[in-house]
Image (cartoon, helix red, strand yellow):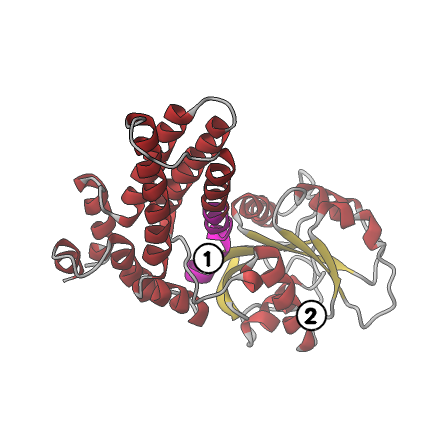
């Protein structure tokens, strides 16, 4: 039905993609983003850009091709202002892609830390029920425990992992395999919640974990805030986007963590009713358009109007592909294959 609506001109390609996004959305804000796209928010924004670039291209063509006619000159200031505005609009769309994807589909989040620092207690807090076994015995969690939770506006696919510590050659082979899987999950995750015991001094394992989180989307949670603090958070702070003192046994910690996750992933800045990019196809087309407009800006400051015109043509081609006006049959087939998954 959706493909017929597209072929009959009832839906644009971005709206057709929004139907699938709406079906598979996780959470209310993800559904709101998809619904905005279904209502044409992205198509309207891109069409407005195409109209401005087309008008600019027509003016350039008339000025270059018909010098004998009384065509107003294209001033460099006007040219740069128009192209800068279009580049900035595309930059904003591209910058919001990651946060929009999180709202639509959620994010894989790994809980890491030494044994007995409170990872499983944290999992139970975020899940809202006793999902993981919690005991005073270090190393209770041997394999990865998975649980999907809704944390504020974001769906987290939580992975509680085996506590990371050094296991000797004659140590427990099952625990060693669990620790190997913990490190592997760190490399795969879109979000890391690293848990540290605030009632103890930092250990070598704590510092190794912190160093492995460097450059990653990671938040350090210094647990057991209800006990006397012995943990020097300054030692790990350089490796994390933020460091939060929490008590994973208290319900209030959930709200603190939710706010921190929203800030880190950028979802707190997203207007769910505004235009946004969905999927790699749209992102790739928008990126090509942005790069072409940036090329036109460079050309406007030295290479001449012919070069500007070529770059504007490239930008228009990319925007038309984004909205589906000149999308190839292969691209259209790829879009609608999503509707057949699971059938």
Quadrant of the frame with the C terminus:
bottom left
Query: x%, y% of residue 308?
Result: 40, 29
Spatial CA span between label 2 and label 1 = 28 Å
Q: Residue at x 21, y 52 (%)?
A: 336
Q: Residue at x 77, y 50 (%)?
A: 237
> 5 or 178, which is in the foreground?
5
Write down the residue under mark 2: 248
The answer to whether 317 appears left or right of 289 in the picture is left
> 223 or 139, which is in the foreground?
223
Query: x%, y% of residue 283?
Result: 40, 45
Q: Residue at x 33, y 48 (%)?
A: 51
Quadrant of the frame with the N terminus:
bottom left
- Badge 1 local density, few (<14 within 10 Å), some, or many (20+)? many
Q: Where residue 100 is drawn, which disc sits there?
A: 1
| Number of on-image labels | 2
Instruction: Write down the region rendered in magenta.
Output: 89-106
> 260 or 56, which is in the foreground?
56
């Amino acid at each position: 039905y959706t493909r017929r609506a597209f072929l009959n001109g009832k839906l644009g390609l971005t709206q057709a993609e929004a139907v699938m996004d709406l079906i598979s959305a996780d959470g209310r804000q993800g559904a709101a983003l998809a619904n905005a796209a279904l209502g044409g928010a992205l198509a309207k924004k891109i069409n407005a850009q195409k109209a401005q670039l087309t008008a600019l291209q027509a003016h350039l063509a008339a000025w270059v091709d018909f010098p004998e006619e009384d065509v107003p000159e294209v001033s460099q200031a006007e040219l740069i202002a128009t192209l800068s505005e279009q580049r900035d609009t595309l930059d904003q769309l591209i910058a919001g892609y990651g946060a929009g994807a999180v709202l639509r589909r959620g994010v894989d989040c790994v809980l890491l830390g030494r044994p007995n620092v409170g990872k499983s207690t944290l999992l139970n807090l975020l899940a809202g029920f006793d999902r993981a076994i919690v005991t005073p015995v270090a190393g209770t969690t041997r394999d990865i425990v998975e649980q999907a939770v809704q944390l504020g506006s974001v769906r987290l696919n939580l992975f509680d992992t085996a506590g990371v510590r050094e296991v000797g050659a004659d140590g427990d082979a099952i625990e060693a395999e669990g620790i190997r899987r913990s490190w592997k999950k760190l490399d795969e995750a879109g979000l890391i919640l690293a848990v540290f015991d605030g009632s103890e001094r930092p250990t070598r394992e704590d510092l190794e974990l912190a160093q492995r989180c460097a450059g990653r989307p990671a938040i350090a949670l210094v647990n057991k805030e209800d006990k006397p603090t012995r943990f020097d958070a300054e030692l790990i702070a350089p490796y994390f986007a933020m460091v939060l003192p929490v008590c994973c046994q208290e319900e209030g910690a959930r709200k603190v963590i939710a706010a921190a996750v929203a800030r880190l992933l950028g979802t707190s800045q997203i207007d769910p009713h505004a235009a946004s990019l969905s999927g790699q196809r749209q992102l790739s087309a928008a990126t090509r358009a942005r790069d072409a407009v940036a090329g036109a800006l460079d050309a406007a400051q030295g290479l001449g109007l012919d070069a500007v015109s070529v770059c504007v043509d490239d930008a228009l081609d990319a925007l038309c592909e984004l909205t589906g006006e000149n999308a190839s049959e292969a691209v259209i087939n790829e879009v609608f294959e999503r509707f057949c998954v699971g059938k």
